[in-house]
Amino acid sequence: SAVVETMAPIALRLCIAVLGLLVRTTGAWGPVAGSHMGASSMVATRRSAPVMMPPMPAPATKTRQKVVTKPKTADPVQGKPSQKTNIAKPKRQTSSAYVPMWKVLLLGDEEYEEDPVVGVIVEVLPEIPMDEARRKFAEAQAKGDSLLTVVNQEHAEAYVSQFHRSTPMVFADAQPE
């Protein structure tokens, strides 16, 4: 509290100084006539209407002139051939770089029940219709695994993670194609 008591007068003086600067620069507010510059002397009195300045003419614009320089050619007197500088053009990089694709496999399990597992497949991979999800489930139970989709590695790992976190937990694996 001692710090607050010592800082309050300083803050007040700072506010008064800022207001004084505002008065000097804008001329919109001013001190009461016949008083010294203090907190009680600053009142919101509107001065006379602002003086309107005549409109400024638009700045003159400079037009840019394009300067074209011709390359030096052979001197007709001496007969020397002109030397042309070959400028290497940058090789264009395409965004169609090879991205390795990964298979997302549904792994068969004896403890699976068809309806909940098919529901999870459709939930994680909405592009697979319900009847195809049932066929994939039956194939995984019969053969041990079934191919669900082929995507890039990042998506494949995300799908496998979603299958493992689902309820019921569905076993899936991602393998390079």
Image (spheres, helix red, strand yellow):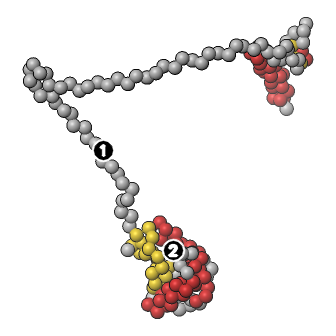
Crowd rating for badge 1 (residues with CA inside 10 Å; few <14, some 14–19, many 20+): few
Q: Residue at x 75, y 14 (%)?
A: 52
Residue 55 left/right relative to 127? right
Which amino acid does the dot numbered 1 rest on? Answer: Pro
**How many discs appear?**
2
- The numbered dot on residue 90 is 1
Q: Quadrant of the C terminus?
A: bottom left
At a point 60% along the width and 82% down the height, the residue shown is: 119
Instruction: State the residue in front, 17 or 156.
Output: 156
Please name the residue shown 8% across and 24% down the image: 79
Q: Nearer the viewer, mark 1 or mark 2?
A: 1
Between residue 159 and residue 55, name the one nearer to us. 55
Label whose residue precedes the other's in the sequence (1 or 2): 1
Check the picture and name the quadrant holding the N terminus: top right
The secondary structure type at the circle numbered 1 is loop
Task: Report whether 120 appears left or right of 103.
Answer: right
Residue 21's x, y, as percent?
76, 16
155 up-or-down from 168: above or below: above
Q: Quadrant of residue 40?
A: top right
Residue lying at 70% horizontally and 13% vertically, measured from the top left: 54
SS under mark 2: helix
Residue corresponding to mark 2:
160
> Residue 107, how many percent across, how many down?
48, 84
Point out which mark residue 158 bears.
none
Residue 145 percent coordinates (x, y): 45, 85
Give the answer, above or below, for where 125 lies relative to 90: below
Residue 17, position as x, y percentages in the image: 78, 17
Disc 2 marks which amino acid?
Val
Res. 120 image quadrant: bottom right
Q: Quadrant of residue 122?
A: bottom right
Q: Is residue 166 at least partly visible in the picture?
A: yes
